[in-house]
Amino acid sequence: MKRLIRLAFVLVLLAPSAVDAQQRRDGYDYFGPQREMVQRGVQAILQCNGLFTSNRTLEQVFEQELAYLRDPIGTAEGGDYLVDWDLKAVAIGADDDIPVMRAAFREGIGCVIMAPDQTFDDIDDLPILETPAPAGDPASMAWPDGDMVEQTPLAAGIDPIALQAASDWAFDRESEEQVTLSLIVVHDGEIIHERYAPGVNMHTKTRTWSTAKSLAVTLMGMMVDEGEMGLDEPLGFEWLPTRAASPETDPRNEITLRHVLNMSSGLYPVDSWGMEYATGSGLAYWAGASSAEGARDRAQIREPGTFWDYENFDTLLGVYAMKQAIGDDQAYLEFPRAALFDKIGMRNTYASVDRFGDFIFSSQVYTTARDLARFGILYEQDGLWHDNRLISEEWIEFVRTPAPATAENGNFYGGQWWLVPDTRTDIPSDAYSTAGNRGQYTVVVPSHDVVIVRRGLDYGRQGFSQWDLTREVLKAFDATDNDR
């Protein structure tokens, strides 16, 4: 009996430490192997696009595109990766416990990430877009439809010294983590300042990251304007995952296009909170999973419209609804070019897809600074292009209206565009901006007829502010213009 009592006493004494050990085990990264696979996939898609979409050298890719990675595989001199220059494809990793990840360039689309169990023999099965380029040579066409830019004196009231100072502010960064590739300033539709870093020019395509979301919302707006989609109508139970038990009575049927474009769907945030490179949209971006299926298969945890949570999958849910509204896979694949890119001279823009043919319009678009300037001009001109209306004023008003769920935190986000936070009083409150990782910005300032494009390959902590850049650029405009 005494022995049993002593044993029980020992167990009681050990219990707290056992709990502590359990808590330590709960901190184990169970997604570690998956993160390593995704890490290889990130390098695969960035290295593939860097070489075959951006047409940069292997040295440039390792120096800048892959600086974003903590520990890229290999160096420009070689390593556990393969570049197939004939296939325009890359394979990252050795044949070990972590899958080799592959990506291949596809005409009109850019590089597509392949599934872990696919090889280069599967490249021909990947989507491709072989639509001919629009008629005409952009080199002999006037800006903004083409690339001929007339050199004219700056308009009265624009200070060239202040404009150059703003440009130097953007390029000469104190933080080595902030790498500006290009800067364009447009006033009244004309380029008044254009600058590129060494190794970059007006034809260099780089990844938009989340600036793609503003392109996506423009295409959805065109569908809404045509009555093919409804901003405040439920997305419909057709979008629900196939395993939904009772689609007709599912509470997710209350989610509207407005909710997902305001980043307020109320669906479970599988795509953030430290899981961006382990699961969620990261598996579609970097590991060959379906972007559409991932966006659809989420539980509702809040009332739609009540909580703002930045989710790539919310954007992709809207993109899936757009695909359903179009109703034809080939028409869907051609839609961005036919409806938008070709009409405003965005000839150097690739909207990429996953291997299933679904647009990854939350991040995976490759384009040039000039093409984004054209895009900004479309918004600065209230949706008109040569007097032809491409986007309604009502839709532009929607994307510039703060999402209700952001009201308590500064009204900083609209419909897939970022807004000037209430706390910023040093720039016009009517400005609004795209924003993408690594410093991709297209800022529209209607009160000044100004568009600002900054492309970057920032890495590490990053932190380049588009609003600080806007402040610096607008110093070049005189007081009379600033007061308009």
Image (cartoon, helix red, strand yellow):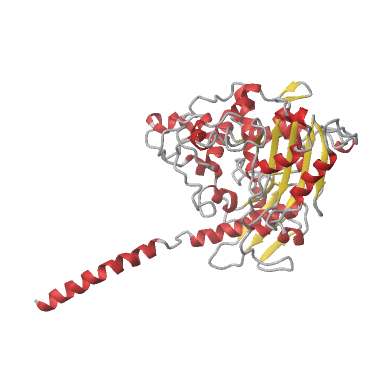
Q: Position of residue 362 (x, y in %)?
A: 60, 42
Q: Which quadrant is the N terminus positioned in?
A: bottom left
Instruction: Mark yes or no: residue 224 visible.
Output: yes
Instruction: Please report the residue visible at 45 percent of the width from the left and 37 percent of the height from the top.
Output: 266
- Left or right of 293? Residue 217 is right
The residue most toward the left is 1
User: Quick check: 346 above or below 119?
Assistant: above
User: Quick check: 275 above or below 62?
Assistant: above
Front-lying residue, 346 or 395: 395
Front-lying residue, 370 or 98: 370
Q: Position of residue 87 (x, y in %)?
A: 73, 55
The residue most toward the bottom is 3
Instruction: Please report the residue visible at 26 percent of the width from the left and 71 percent of the height from the top.
Output: 14
Q: Position of residue 373 (x, y in %)?
A: 75, 37
Quarter of the image for residue 151 reads top right
Q: Which quadrant is the C terminus positioned in?
A: top right
Q: Position of residue 334 (x, y in %)?
A: 68, 34
Instruction: Please report the residue visible at 69 percent of the width from the left and 63 percent of the height from the top.
Output: 82
Number of callouts in the render?
Answer: 0
Front-lying residue, 289 or 150: 150
Instruction: Mark yes or no: residue 343 visible.
Output: no
